[in-house]
Image (cartoon, grey):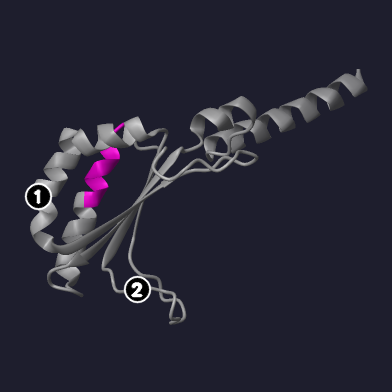
Amino acid sequence: MEASRREMAVMIALGGTGIALGATGAATGAEAATVRPRLVHHVFFWLKRHGSQEDRDRLIAGLRTLRGIPVIQNLEIGIPASTEARDVVDASYDVSELMFFGSVEDQKTYQDHPIHQAFVKACEHLWDKVVVYDMAVVPDGSSVPTAGSG
């Protein structure tokens, strides 16, 4: 009977660990394949009034509305980090957003989504320049696709 209780306690502990990992977004096995992004969309914004805290806050608030678009797997919003100045680091932008999508089609759905269209209409007067980097994710162990094929 004692061995059964010990085994049960181990199973409960391991099950709890699995639930905790699932709750934090750590996926394993088949689940990882369905959650892993296929496309990364990174956008950099330069404000018309560079350094304006008010405009930066308005742009960030607008970007947060994009979280309502279901095809976005994850959205991170940031500002230049206070890292050491080096020739290869461009910290001239004011705000950046980093999005993860399951496919190129999902990214297109995002572009056409009414929430994205409303964001552009509400905030485009704030920025002077926008630069976008779209990246096709190369899965571990896969050959590298040709540029523009993903």
Marking on residue 3: none
Q: Quadrant of the N terminus?
A: top right
Horizontal side of residue 11 vs 129, given as left or right: right
Q: Amino acid at mark 1?
A: Ala
Q: Nearer the viewer, residue 63 or 33?
A: 33
Marking on residue 122: 1
Placement of 51 over or under 146, stated as above or below:
below
Q: Is residue 134 magenta?
A: no
Placement of 100 over or under 84, stated as above or below:
above
Q: Which residues are magenta?
A: 63-70
Residue at disc 1, secondary structure = helix
Q: CA distance from mark 2 to mark 1?
A: 25 Å
Horizontal side of residue 133 vs 54, given as left or right: right
Q: Quadrant of residue 4?
A: top right
Q: Quadrant of residue 117?
A: top left
In the orientation shown, which residue stands out farthest toward the top?
1
Residue at horizontal 72 percent and vertical 27 percent from the top: 12
Placement of 55 over or under 64, stated as above or below:
below
Taken as a whole, is the magenta stretch helix, strand or loop? Answer: helix
Residue depth check, mark 2 versus mark 1: number of the one nearer the observer:
2
Q: Earlier in the sequence, mark 2 or mark 1?
A: 2
Residue under numbered circle 2: 91
Badge 1: residue crowd in 10 Å (few <14, some 14–19, many ≥20) = few
Residues at circles 2 and 1 in contact by the CB criterion of under 8 Å: no
Residue at horizontal 47 percent and vertical 42 percent from the top: 146
Residue at horizontal 45 percent and vertical 76 percent from the top: 83
Examine the rendering and report whether any part of residue 71 can be seen: no
Q: Quadrant of the C terminus?
A: top left
Q: Amino acid at mark 2?
A: Ala
Badge 2: residue crowd in 10 Å (few <14, some 14–19, many ≥20) = some
Q: Is residue 64 magenta?
A: yes
Residue 99 horizontal/vertical position (percent): 36, 46
